Amino acid sequence: FGERYLGERRVAGVALLTRAQKEGLIGAIHAPADLYDMIYGTLFYQSTFGLKRLTAGAARRLVDRVLRPAG
């Protein structure tokens, strides 16, 4: 499950972040794999353990803080 389902999606997500950094669409300077883990790790942890109710606004704020979008 981890390799087939989560691994493939992680590879795609990291590739997307890599491309976005190269094109200057996001301002984050961390490695794309680290950015992916910061976002999805936080969301997964909060969801799995019921620590916070995940709202669209909370998810957007997390992504904005991690990626620090350019422009």
Image (tube, rainbow, N blue to C red):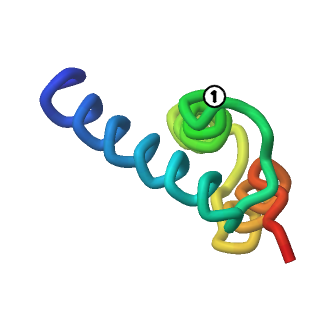
Q: Residue at x 70, y 63 (%)?
A: 24
Horizontally, residue 25 falls left or right of residue 16, namely right
Horizontally, residue 46 falls left or right of residue 16, namely right
Q: Residue at x 68, y 61 (%)?
A: 59
- Is residue 70 positioned above or below 21 on the image? below
Residue at image mark 1: 34
- Residue 26 place in picture, x, y as percent: 72, 60
What crowding class fits label 1: few (fewer than 14 Cα within 10 Å), some (14-19), or many (20 or more)?
few
Quarter of the figure with residue 23? bottom right
- Residue 17 place in picture, x, y as percent: 54, 50
Horizontally, residue 27 falls left or right of residue 35, namely right
- Is residue 61 positioned above or below 33 on the image? below
- Residue 50 place in picture, x, y as percent: 61, 39
The quarter of the picture where the N terminus appears is top left
The quarter of the picture where the C terminus appears is bottom right
Q: Residue at x 60, y 54 (%)?
A: 22
Residue toward you, 50 or 68? 68
Q: Considering the numbered disc 1 on the image, is that residue within a helix, a strand or a loop?
A: helix
Residue toward you, 13 or 27? 27
User: Is residue 45 in sight in this rendering?
Assistant: no
Residue toward you, 32 or 64? 32
User: Is residue 67 in sight in this rendering?
Assistant: yes
Residue toward you, 7 or 27? 27
